[in-house]
Amino acid sequence: MLELAYDAKRFVLHLRSIIEVAPLQVYYSGLLFTPGSSLIRGAYFKNIPWLTMEPKVADMWGSLIQTLEGHTWYVNSAVFSPNGKLVASVSWDNTVRLWDTSTGMQCGVLEGHTDTVNSAVFSPDGKLLASASCDNTLRLWDTSTGTQCGLLKDHTSEVNSAVFSPDGTLVAFASSDNTVRLWDISAGKQCGVLEGHTNWVYSAVFSPDGKLVASASNDRTVRLWDTSTRKQCGVLEGHTNLVYSAVFSPNGKLVASASWDCTVRLWDISTGKQCAVLEGHTKDVNSAVFSPDGNLVISASNDKTVRLWDTSTGQKCGVLEGHTDLVYSAVFSPNGKLVASASKDNTVRLWDISTGKQHGVLEGHTSWAYSAVFSPDGKLVASASRDKTIRLWNTSTRKQCGDLEGHTWVVNSAVFSPDGKLVASASLDNMVRLWDTSTGEQCGVLEGHTAAVNSAVFSPDAKLVASASLDKTVRLWDTSTAKQCGVLDGHTRDVNSVMFSPDGKLVASASWDATVRLWDTKSETTIEIIKTHAGINILNFSNDGMHLHTSDGILQLKSYPHSGGNWELPHTLPHSLDVTDQWITCNMKKLLWLPVEYRLSCSAVNDTGNLIVIGSPSGRVTFISIDFTALPAAYLQPSVNVAVIEGTGFLGLVGC
């Protein structure tokens, strides 16, 4: 019974946000995405009749307890209240939000800042909260009422962080004007300026006895200050890049500093000497903090992880993985049993460090998946990623069956040839590469672009590839020789996408210059220019070749030869399966909620419209297949009717 109660608690905390919005998803998404060994899943999950291919899930609960959603932009930091009952998070959405740690419910939105909020900190008694912002101000808030009770705007540049003294009488705040300033809470005014850094100061912190302040700076140093004299009393040097944060150990004998040189360093305050270098992060380290007993340090990094370190040995003793973007900060709860981390993926995550390493399943790519596309026969999916690779997946087994490596930078897109034998990939390394899908070997390097390539596409007979680039050109390539055979030059800004007409005689290209151009592939000349509302990044010919379906609507082509002026929309599937930010939808109706770790950076739907592939920022690729005949009738009726309105060269879609 205890195991069942524990499992039920984890289940409810994991799903709290969707329970509030769509409680019936507990029976679909909730059970579907719960770890396989969950007792709740085992007792209540029956095969969903309309789901013919389920996503892979972790075997058991990991360290991640809960994801707190509510911010509308990046979350910079999160901090526990002294009694551990609240978490305050700050965001690029200009707000501070308060959360109840026992339920995960949002219990306050502190609004007033007019720019990004960089950090927040509770007073020692938990009654006040100080927030630092890019609007050059420090604000004080009453945590019981959520009202602003103080405003300091003496800085001439953004305020990066704030911290209360142990007795709660002072606030120190660090700024991009190279200073740390002290604020007397009772007097409500500034009472000191600590000057000495030669570049921006990112953070400042009091020692446990309140006699010192340590400040971390872009000048690669940590400086120590005497709070009674306001004088500098030490400089800790050794980092080889900017120092983003510094913190005292609970006994005040050590300082831990986090740097963009990918390390955390420990310093002995009595000697000013470095006593350990904590190495393991693969990207910038944004913050480090001691556990309440001083035995551990946790660090948050741009490598998307939070790492645990033993302060006595300097050895790594844990990695908390699950965020899908860089992690700005992490902090222990007062009892040292929980960690809260804040990330650019717009979430705050709570971790139970006693359970050790999270048992997550992150498959395939090691970074963002930017695009996914089905092969013509639907048996394969190719996904392109920020990790510089293209991966091939078998749609029936959901197993990776190819790893196409060769690009030296981010791969923006991949596309199959019409016969499925080749893949063309476009990359920020200015190249298009051709790959044999049967062997996984590279069979051509298309060189000639002078800037990043956004997309590439095969002609209907697969004899040509057209590529669109930031160098403002579209280039044509012979696939048999891998040689350039044409340059379509005319756009005045980056070219986003390119597409062949059904007969292969024309190429359409879309650019950030707010035009779509139609080109004759033989003469390499522009035969039509259509002005659009903005830059277009989705471009497809209709089946009859007379219209272009774009992210800006349907464009009617004047130049394409056709008889009688009649046209038809291309064949459409009876049911429409799609992915939005948080949902898989059917006919524009919400069908299945996606937890954060399964949300998309790209997606593709097969030709029959029943199989959807989702690429996530974590690198995970998820397959979900639907049987439309088993869906409730309500999902089989379109949510809107579509009418086509003909204008001057433009056809718009409107809901009726």
Image: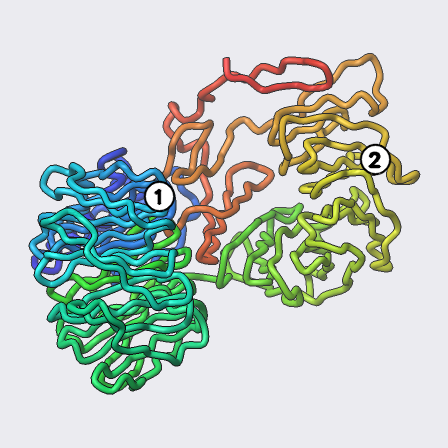
Q: Residue 443, percent across and down?
A: 76, 64
Label 1 vs 2, first from the N-terminus = 1
Q: Is residue 595 visible?
A: no
Q: Which residue is mark 1?
A: 135
Marks 1 and 2 sit apart, C-alpha to C-alpha, by 49 Å
Residue at figure coordinates x 30%, y 39% from the top left? 113
Residue at figure coordinates x 71%, y 57% from the top left? 430
Q: Residue 512, percent across and down?
A: 67, 37
Residue at figure coordinates x 65%, y 52% from the top left? 414
Q: Residue 147, percent across and down?
A: 16, 36
Residue at figure coordinates x 69%, y 24% from the top left? 555
* Nearer the camera: disc 1 or disc 2: 1
Q: Is residue 338 above or below residue 142?
A: below
> Is residue 337 left or right of 197 when viewed as pictured?
left
Q: Is residue 221 above or below residue 189?
A: below
| Amino acid type, label 1 | Asp
> Is residue 496 left or right of 79 when viewed as pictured?
right
Classify residue 649 by image quadrant. top right
Quarter holding the N terminus is bottom left
> Is residue 41 left or right of 626 when viewed as pictured?
left
Q: Residue 439, percent across and down?
A: 69, 66
Q: Secondary structure at mark 1?
A: loop
Judging depth in this view, the residue of 117 and 625 nearest the camera is 117
Q: Which mark is residue 519?
A: 2
